[in-house]
Image: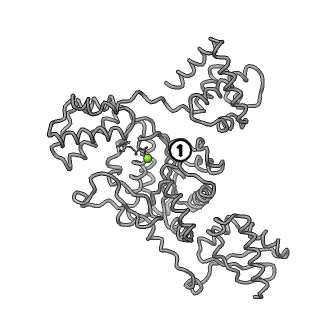
Amino acid sequence: MSGTDQERWLRVKERLRAEVGDEIYQSWFARMDLERIEGDTVHLSVPTRFLKSWIQSHYLDRVLLCWQAEQPEIQKIDVAVRSAVIRTALPKPKPAEAIEPGQGMRPRPDIGDVRPAFGPLSSGHDALGGSPLDLRLTFDTFVVGRSNTLAHAAAKQVAVGRRGEPVMFNPLYVHAGVGLGKTHLLQATTWAGNGAGERRVLYLTAEKFMYGFVSALRTQTALAFKEALRGIDVLVIDDLQFLQGKSTQAEFCHTLNALIDAGRQVVIAADRPPTDLESLDDRVRSRLAGGLVVEMGALGEELRLEILKTRVNAARQYHPAFEVPAPVLAYIAKSVTHNGRDLEGAINRLLAHNKLTGQPVTMEMAEREVRDLIRPQEPKRVKIEDIQRIVARQYNVSRADLLSSRRTANVVRPRQVAMYLAKTLTLRSLPEIGRRFGGRDHTTVLHAVRKIEGLVGNDTMLADEIEVLKRQLQE
Ligand code: ADP
Ligand code: MG
């Protein structure tokens, strides 16, 4: 191969770097070498099969175009995996096992003596490892009720899946408000999946994904990170709403696509449905919505009571004298309605009081201890779809009319009302609301909101209509 070929290759690489940006260049192309040029074909090589298939499926056209800009007669790019001999000359990629949940993450039979009283058990020795798992968050301690039956069944299904079997829904996307059991369900899935032995399940918070990925890029071990992803059967990502940053999202999108296309299971939890993840781009959103999307609703009173009982039983393993009379449990289940975290907090307080003072748990003590956990009913999460549906029904137009560009009076007013409600009852931004109303501009939404605000002051009929709509939506 001539020196000019190598020089040309350097120029092509510079073009590539300029086009895709430094980060992506570093993670995918930094270790790509020119082997030779034969006729109209350029032969390139990379150190791993994974890198090869990734470049082939995502960047081959790009590489070809960059090459043609330097040498128009080139028609084809061939990417091969470099032989082992060449590979030993390179820094050895970390073995995938080292950065996955290892033995330490499996539930241990001798839990009685070793487990920490509370709080997470650290599992990672490596910045790229899975996020810590809490030993208590298993399927055994997860109580199933009306609000989470479907999510639970889907997670169980994922957990019992076998390597190589077709996955039923991908990704599995669970969403719910704070404290309603997302993390519990995801960690249970991780424990159960890893416990079965043959499959590898990696649990990451979105923050860990970002941190792991970004620092991996910095330390030039992006390759190892991607190798690790390749080695996992199920990727579980918690709190996806925290995923931020353009390049992180691009890499998340790549990762998601690669895993799903390879038939690996992806499980995601967030505090809102995919359509409401405003910071993600449309392609990612639609990919996320393309699997099974399940919502977990508020914990009903029965479910709360069961969770409390489970908690008391768990505490009694270490504190056998801890007793909570049934009426006290019923009282807490009835009054601490907010979320699972407060239920846990309530039991912890009773336990602490009981241990510190030696006094038995009574109703009076419970009332005093949990007083500040009793909050006024949280307003229900209102969805834009519900607003559109209920407004359309009220004014006898179709939802499609609301989203359409029609400007007849019988559609314009309901549309403005619906946008006004979307702004006042949800936390969505103006651009997001515009997008959800047939791709309108945020100024249109703002105009609608101002218009209705101006009208309700004088028009009592309209004010009443809006009150009725609000009540229906918040029921
Ligand atoms: P999220 O991740 O949705 O904010 P968590 O999974 O952290 O909520 O749940 C908060 C607390 O409530 C945890 O202690 C969890 O164990 C408990 N919890 C929530 N739902 C359930 C359930 N169905 N069964 C048992 N415990 C639950
Ligand atoms: Mg959580």
Report x, y in % for residue 441: 73, 36
**Camera-nearest residue between 275 and 15:** 15
- Secondary structure at badge 1 equals strand
Q: How many marks?
A: 1
For residue 345, side relative to residue 376 (left or right): left
Report x, y in % for residue 67: 78, 73
Ligand 1 quadrant in view = top left
At 28% from the left edge and 56% from the top edge, which residue is drawn? 116
Q: Which residue is farthest right?
A: 72
Picture layout, residue 420 above or below residue 9 = above
Q: Which quadrant, please, contains the N terminus?
A: bottom right
For residue 377, side relative to residue 38 (left or right): left
Mark 1 residue type: Val
For residue 324, side relative to residue 283 (left or right): left
**Camera-nearest residue between 189 and 198:** 189
How packed mark 1 is, by other alpha carbons closer than 10 Å (few <14, some 14-19, many 20 or more), is some
For residue 170, side relative to residue 368 (left or right): right
At 77% from the left edge and 83% from the top edge, which residue is drawn? 5
Image quadrant in which you'd find residue 33? bottom right
Picture layout, residue 136 above or below residue 474 = below
Residue 192 shows in this picture: no
At 44% from the left edge and 61% from the top edge, which residue is drawn? 130
Image quadrant in which you'd find residue 4? bottom right
Which residue is label 1 attached to? 293
Picture layout, residue 206 above or below residue 276 = below
Residue 336 shows in this picture: yes
Report x, y in % for residue 423: 61, 30
Report x, y in % for residue 329: 26, 33
